[in-house]
Amino acid sequence: MSLIHRGRLAVAVAALLAVSGPLLAAENVMLVLDASGSMWGQIDGRAKIEIAREATGRVVSDWDQANQIGLIAYGHRRKGDCADIETLIPLGPMEGDVFMDTVNAINPKGMTPLSQAVIDAAAALKSSEQKATVILVSDGEETCKLDPCAVGAELEKSGVDFTAHVIGFDVQNPAHQAQLRCLAENTGGRYFNARDAQELSSAVQGAMKTSTEPPPPPATATLKPQGKAVITQQLSVDWTGPADEGDFITVVLPDAPDGRYTTYAYVPQTEGDGSGEVSFEMPATAGDYELRYVSPSREEQVLAREPVSIGDLEAMIDAPETAIAGTTLTVTARGPKSGSHWVGFVEPGADVGSYLANHYARLPEQGDQLAIKVPAELGDYELRYVLNESERVAYSRPIKVVAAEISVDGPAEVMAGNRVTITASGPVDGSHWIGFAPAGGDAGAYVNNAYYRPEAASGSGVVTAPLEPGDYEYRYVLFESQKVAASKPVKVIPATATLSVPAMASASSEIEVAFTGPRNGSNWIGIVAVGGDGSEYQGWAYVPDEGDSVRFYTPEQAGDWEVVFVQDNQVLARQPISVQ
């Protein structure tokens, strides 16, 4: 994990606990937790909802009983319902065990009506006629049509002493960050962008200290950049300053408000004034910026400012003018290196945040070649070199996706449940498949266990035909369900079988039974009681892939029995046999 991300989270968590932990004056706080389905997404191997529960637990453990708190969650009961907002705990004194039991029982699953949830929280706080704070923790954009900016502005006019502090938790899209930031700033609150959880433990104690003690006296700091600043690259900065818990150094545009930040690095805590060096990535756009030393615990938070000019870096992509749909394209990409940059396909003229899922690749740590999956849909695209996920398009060039020679073939008529050889040719990828689909179904339609993955540009595969008779298609499908590249109709007819059984056999003796019928790995032939459905059987054998007979033993008990051919728990044929 980078120092930048650790610094971001430490500052965000310090701010969260500073406004929601034991406060300097009695305050009513309503915590609004995102419980939409995306909160099951993972950061460093842990679900985001687990990290949010842990952060809430630290707030609860050090809560000042002079303050009251309530809890609202959204998206935790139903999928696709914008009305799924619930006050889980009304505003009142903190009862730690009850509060945490409630938080731990939240099960994310639904939409993100974050604006309405903040409205509901403000309404609950307004009735107290005291200073009120809403803390919203959200990992995504508003999905229920309200405008967070407008909601924030209206709430500020509502007459209650109300502030909304918003924490964007793993919100990578700048447009979604802007939504959340606007909501906070329109109520006089602050927006914090938390990227991961690793710095949570080290940030808690310093954040609590910041929350419970008076602001420290004014302090000074200095900043001195080392070397030339270049877009997206690390810049080392020498610093002096108070080095309190939560202090950080960031780079912003010169006219940015004091609360703004982009990339930054956390300043290690020391006793008394400190000094040292930190390094962090510069923004993706060249120009004139300002380095700032920020101390969140002080009334005047910006302790030092230092101008810095950030130079540009050229980027390029060497690739052909055309690419074959469904294949893997190898390109050469030269330019800034970072784990947050990518090269890939987008629709022509798409905005800077656009991308095509599965059709991009990260820049390698070594070398300049990378492999990108070519989209299945034909047409004109752009290949882009994008910095910091979606901050800036450093380079783009047109590329046309053209058709591949793709074919699929097999028998025009097959028996239900029988093994079928399908021949095909076309692009190879682990997410392409060849097999059966219902006739006329969309590109995502398929039949369970009736397909195979292509391992070569041409060849054949053996699959089991559907068990249900009807009209189907052989299909060559690209990227699971992106496009049906080739198809051919096939009719699946009802399964039939025949058995050739000796009329009589000795008890506990081996017999040979000739057969015709569908072959697959689960069909079997065996002896059952007269009229039996195959659920109870004596001797039996699986239907082989090759050959036209099977051998098995008769029962020990003499009497009349039947030999049956069974597929999917259905008896396709039966013949009597007398055991002596």
Image (cartoon, grey):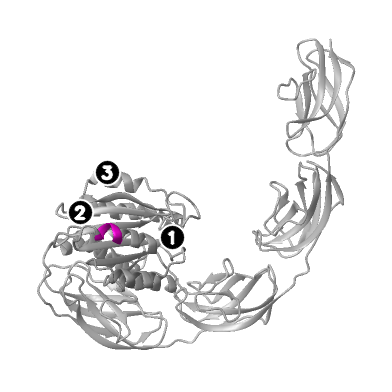
Question: Measured from the top left, where is residue 280 in percent x and y?
Answer: 33, 76
For the point 76% across and 41% down, which residue is it?
467
Q: Residue at x 30, y 86 (%)?
A: 255
Position of 417 compared to 214: left or right?
right
- Name which residue type carries label 3: Val
Rendered image quadrant of residue 348: bottom right
How many callouts does the rendering have? 3
- Look at the image and tell me in which quarter the C terminus lies: top right
Q: Mark 2 points at which residue?
A: 68
Q: Mark 1–mark 3 contact, CB under 8 Å?
A: no
Q: On the image, numbered disc 1 is attached to which residue?
A: 112
Instruction: Give me the residue at 18% from left, 60% from top.
Output: 27
SS state under label 2: strand
- The answer for how far apart the CA atoms under marks 3 and 2 are is 14 Å
- For marks 3 and 2, the one nearer the N-term is 2
Toward the viewer: 179 or 240? 179
Element at label 1: loop
Q: Where is residue 469 in the image (x, y as percent from the top left)?
A: 80, 43
Other residues around mark 2 within 10 Å, as few (<14) / some (14–19) / many (≥20): some
Name which residue type carries label 1: Thr
Circle 2: residue type: Gln
Magenta part, dominant SS: helix
Q: Distance between the residues labelled 1 and 2?
A: 26 Å
Query: Which element type, helix, strand or loop, lies under badge 3?
Result: helix
Q: What stretch is highlighted in magenta?
A: 122-126
The answer to whether residue 199 is visible is: no
Q: Where the N terminus falls, by quadrant?
A: bottom left
User: Residue 128 occupies which quadrant of the picture?
Assistant: bottom left
